């Protein structure tokens, strides 16, 4: 990934453009296909998968960093969608609803993996080992994101890439808004520090 990191007004780096965007959740779903899916039409479900499956996989991969885990998320999300689409009321676009299912599923995986690590933000980053920047890494956004603790990476992806507000993330994580704000601030600082370190290594080579 060789797109440059975008600098924000305050001098920090924006990861909205650094990480591939256009996840696909913004696509519309026609009413006919939705109604057919509500009636259990498997052809309609296949059409929905073709349209949104890639978006679900991309979001899960960005957060979890593991292709196999992302594939499991896609399967779980579409199984849940199959059983709950009849209750979809259309208060929000279908893609937004499916994105919420995907975000919830990935956060559930993070909770299961970090059950004994607690929710202390300071401890989250203290447990993060310092990684020396290699010249080969450059300022590749994916490599930088993978250095973050999984929960911090989830906050960055959901807020900076997928557009979730801190209020929405508070509901997703079952925490206060200040929880995700604190993680995001620490994560962006760490990303910018690492990006700067990589740039220095490249300058020396």
Image (tube, helix red, strand yellow):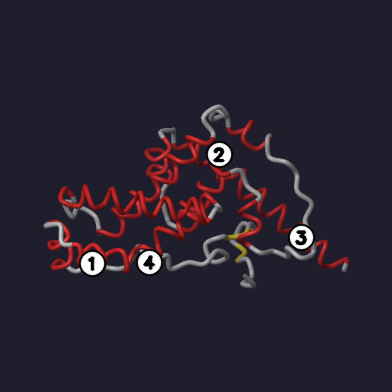
Element under disc 1 = loop
Q: Which of the marked residues, 2 or 4, is nearer the chain's N terminus? A: 4
Please say if the residues under marks 1 and 4 sit with CB atoms less than 8 Å apart.
Answer: no
Separation of residues labelled 3 and 4 (CA atoms): 31 Å
Separation of residues labelled 1 and 3 (CA atoms): 42 Å
- Residue 115 screen position, x and y as percent: 51, 30
Circle 1 residue: 29
Left or right of 170 on screen, residue 20: right
Please say if the residues under marks 2 and 4 sit with CB atoms less than 8 Å apart.
Answer: no
Element under disc 3 = helix
Please say if the residues under marks 3 and 2 sit with CB atoms less than 8 Å apart.
Answer: no
Q: Which label belongs to residue 24? A: 4
In the image shown, does 9 or 199 lie closer to the viewer? 199
Left or right of 66 on screen, residue 27: left
- Residue 84 screen position, x and y as percent: 21, 48
Separation of residues labelled 2 and 1 (CA atoms): 36 Å
Circle 2 residue: 182
Left or right of 110 on screen, residue 201: right
Left or right of 124 on screen, residue 100: left
Separation of residues labelled 3 and 2 (CA atoms): 24 Å
- Residue 39 screen position, x and y as percent: 11, 57
Find residue 175 and report its image quarter.
top left
Q: Is residue 80 above or below residue 139?
A: above
Circle 3 residue: 198
């Amino acid at each position: 990934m060789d797109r440059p990191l975008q600098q924000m007004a305050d001098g920090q780096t924006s990861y909205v453009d650094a990480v591939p965007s256009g996840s696909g959740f913004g696509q519309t779903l026609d009413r006919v296909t939705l109604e057919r899916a509500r009636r259990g039409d498997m052809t309609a479900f296949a059409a929905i998968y073709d349209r949104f499956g890639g978006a679900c996989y991309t979001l899960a991969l960005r957060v979890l960093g593991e292709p196999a885990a992302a594939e499991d998320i896609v399967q779980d999300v579409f199984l849940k969608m199959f059983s709950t689409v009849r209750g979809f009321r259309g208060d929000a676009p279908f893609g937004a609803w499916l994105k919420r299912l995907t975000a919830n599923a990935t956060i559930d995986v993070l909770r299961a993996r970090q059950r004994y690590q607690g929710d202390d933000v300071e401890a989250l980053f203290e447990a993060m080992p310092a990684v020396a920047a290699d010249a080969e890494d450059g300022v590749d956004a994916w490599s930088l994101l993978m250095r973050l603790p999984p929960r911090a990476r989830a906050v960055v992806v959901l807020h900076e890439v997928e557009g979730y507000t801190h209020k929405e993330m508070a509901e997703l994580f079952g925490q206060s808004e200040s929880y995700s704000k604190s993680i995001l601030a620490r994560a962006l600082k760490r990303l910018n520090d690492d990006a700067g370190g990589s740039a220095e290594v490249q300058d020396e080579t």
